[in-house]
Amino acid sequence: MLKGFKEFIMRGNVVDLAVAVVIGVAFGAVVTALVKDLLTPIVAAIVGKPDFSNLTFTINKSKFFYGDFINAALQFVLISAAIYFFVVLPIKKLTEMQARRRAAGEPQDVASISSDEAILLREIRDLLAAQRSV
């Protein structure tokens, strides 16, 4: 029973998912800070009010806090804009640049884009080839 659990946990996709969740949470904190500390004050400077939570109206002794909804909607729009302009657009431009290079037939400089793992694997390959020739 524990062996099966260990195999399940050690699968690449489970570990990758866990890493993605942790990075996603950290990235969420960065985007939230960007919106709260930089973008919301800009909106406050334009509109004159950074927090709309005090906006309410009453119907038959029922109080409606529509200001909280405005805050949530504004935060959603600002977070969406931050993700689009600071993540999606730059990645899209990089992808387009790579596609243009491939289409132009420019050779990929593997040494400049290699990861540490790829370098280590090449070194292991070279050592094994040297051992075979001896």
Image (cartoon, rainbow, N blue to C red):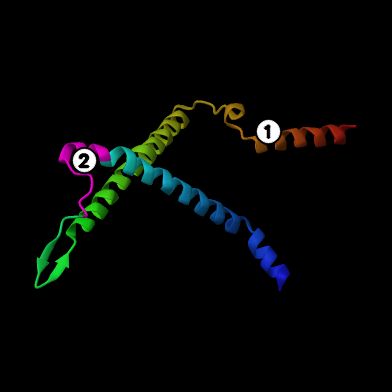
Magenta range is 41-53
Q: Is residue 56 left or right of residue 126?
A: left
Residue plotted at (65% across, 35% down): 116
Residue pointed to by mark 2: 44
Residue plotted at (54% across, 56% down): 17
Q: Position of residue 101 (x, y in %)?
A: 45, 28
Residue at the right extreme? 134
Q: In the figure, residue 96 lies in which quadrant?
A: top left
Question: Which quadrant is home to the N terminus?
Answer: bottom right
Image depth: mark 2 or mark 1 in front? 2
Q: Position of residue 95 (x, y in %)?
A: 43, 36
Residue plotted at (90% across, 32% down): 134
- Mark 2 is surrounded, within 10 Å at the Cα level, by few (under 14), some (14 to 19) or many (20 or more) other residues, namely few
Q: Position of residue 45 (x, y in %)?
A: 20, 36
Q: In the figure, residue 63 lies in which quadrant?
A: bottom left
- The secondary structure type at the circle numbered 2 is helix
Which comes before the other along the chain, label 2 or label 1? 2
Residue pointed to by mark 1: 119
Q: In the figure, residue 38 lies in which quadrant?
A: top left
- Mark 1 is surrounded, within 10 Å at the Cα level, by few (under 14), some (14 to 19) or many (20 or more) other residues, namely few
- The secondary structure type at the circle numbered 1 is helix
Q: Pick the residue in front: 13 or 79.
A: 79
Q: Position of residue 111 (x, y in %)?
A: 62, 27
State yes or no: residue 47 in magenta.
yes
Q: What's the CA distance linking mark 2 and mark 1?
A: 50 Å
Q: Pick the residue in front: 4 or 132.
A: 4
Q: Amino acid at mark 1?
A: Ile
Q: Amino acid at mark 2?
A: Ala
Residue plotted at (39% across, 35% down): 90
